Image (cartoon, rainbow, N blue to C red):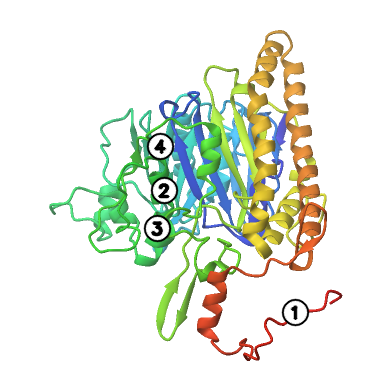
Amino acid sequence: MHRLFLPIITIFTFLASTGPAAACTNFIATKGATVDGSVMVTYTCDGEFHPHLRLTPAADHEPGAVEQIKDWSGNVLGEVALPAHTFQVVNLMNEHQVTIAETTTGGREELVNPDGLLHYWTLMRLVLQRAASAREAVEVMGALVDQYGYRSSGESFYIGGKDEAWVVEMVGPGPGGQGAHWVALRVPDGYVIAHANLGRIDTFDRRDKKNCLTSKGLEEFAASSGWYDPDGEQEFSWRRAFHPTTPQNLRYTSTRVWSLYRRCAPSQEWPMDFHRGVEGAEPLPLWIKPEKKLAVADVFELMRDHYEGTELDMTQGVDSGPYGTPHRWRPMGWEVDGQYYTWERPISTQQTGFSMVTQSRDWLPDAIGGLTWYGVDDTYFTCYVPLYCGIESVPESFATGSLGKFGWDSAWWVFNFVSNYANLKYQYMLPDIRIVQAELEGDFLDLQPAIEKTAVELAKSDPALMSRYLTDYSVTHAEAVVDKWRDLGEYLLTKYNDGYVKDENGRPQEKGYPEAWLRAVLEQHPDKFLLPDTGAGQVKEPEDY
């Protein structure tokens, strides 16, 4: 029993020094939209930070116990009352298979309330410690901000549970205001939904309490602020009132949603007008029905997207460099000769700290049914490892390290080494990396039924042994992946040393540059590299150069 609960540091500790990351992508697939009937939630937590994977154990608390709430710099902002019992949380899933993801939507800057107590990452953790279902998570979230105040800018929260999934969009009340303004909708079964840094909820029926929950006074507040005309012809729209758009933020945000939807329903036409900022263009639907049900591996691949196969393909063109890298270095926007430009922002980005794909499954015991597939760094180059919500510890290499110092003991740095090195010869190294990735993830997915069958049998006779079994499986296999990735990094460094590509016999081969890129160089410098025509043929370098 605890008078004062000092929580184990969560993954959001990095925010103490860096502030929040406003660049995340989320996706939900409901039970009827997945092959196995699980609810899936994805989260790419994007930003320049070193994440620490953490497990916060369940705990009992005495009456009157409180938790201190601190800001990014460690200053105490206030206290939150603790319930009699808080649930275990592994990363962002609790012991009841409830999971929460977020994407910062910003909204109207004037609605940020510096007097509120709860930043979004604090709110997520508190909800996971208190809610046993997705709907309860929405209700607890609303109650917490009502009581303690909301401190962040606009956020969209994706909440998944064993039976259903909800999307919650929230903004603050402005300086000195009370609570928060929010709307929550239950995602229809059989559908998928995506968010990427922009509020997307439009109109809704607050009378439908089964599928819609809201804070009080939304329309009145929007009307008093001049963002909604109750006497006008248009129905109240959350998106229009609280999330004004610009061509730049539409391109940065809605293009990612468009790409997820066009991959889930490829036979449909998905106009680009809205995310290209065409005035009066029709927004994308809030959710869609996928043309085929999604397996876990399908969802992994959805999060590995650079718009390949479209006119926005970031692996093509002179801006991808000679070797077709999809990465664009920040800042996203730039100015030349008084004109403003912006790079595309893909789902998969080098700035991802960690990402996850969760499964919540009502036909299994909670400790087994709740599963987080966890990866660090760029989704395209990560390997998702399975972490069951009933485990007793987390792999050490995912819970150590810092942004300021490289270390082979840190999984995040190991994966960053591989992905950063791959930028030197992206299209050459990519197949080497993807082969290892597919092998490891394929093995996990193949093993999953057998692992869970054994765990279910253990749960019947010895739940404690079941927990140790799942812990050993999750931890040892995650560490084995990191070992494999270290080996992969050393292999790539050897094979592609000094720009060469070694063949199967270990002899370096000169590969040069693609002709299309060479032509682009010559357009800029038509004579700079030109050799005089002496009739002597091509000049050859000596073999011992």
Q: Please give the residue where the numbered disc 3 appears in the rendered image.
A: 107
- Foreground label between 1 and 3: 1
Secondary structure beneath disc 2? strand
Marks 2 and 4, Cα distance to the nearest angstrom?
A: 20 Å
Marks 1 and 3, Cα distance to the nearest angstrom?
A: 61 Å
Image point (54%, 51%), residue name? 119
- Foreground label between 1 and 2: 1
Q: Which mark is residue 159?
A: none
Q: Amino acid at mark 3?
A: Gly
Q: Amino acid at mark 4?
A: Val
Q: Position of residue 216 (x, y in %)?
A: 32, 42
- Foreground label between 2 and 4: 4
Direction from residue 543 to residue 91 in the image, left or right? left
Q: Is residue 416 above or below residue 454?
A: below
Marks 4 and 3, Cα distance to the nearest angstrom?
A: 23 Å
Q: Please give the residue where the numbered disc 2 appears in the rendered image.
A: 170
Secondary structure beneath disc 1? loop
- Quadrant containing the C terminus is bottom right
Marks 3 and 2, Cα distance to the nearest angstrom?
A: 9 Å
Q: Position of residue 223 (x, y in %)?
A: 24, 55
Instruction: Compare residues 519 and 229 and report the one nearer the observer.
Output: 519
Q: Are marks 1 and 4 in contact (CB under 8 Å)?
A: no
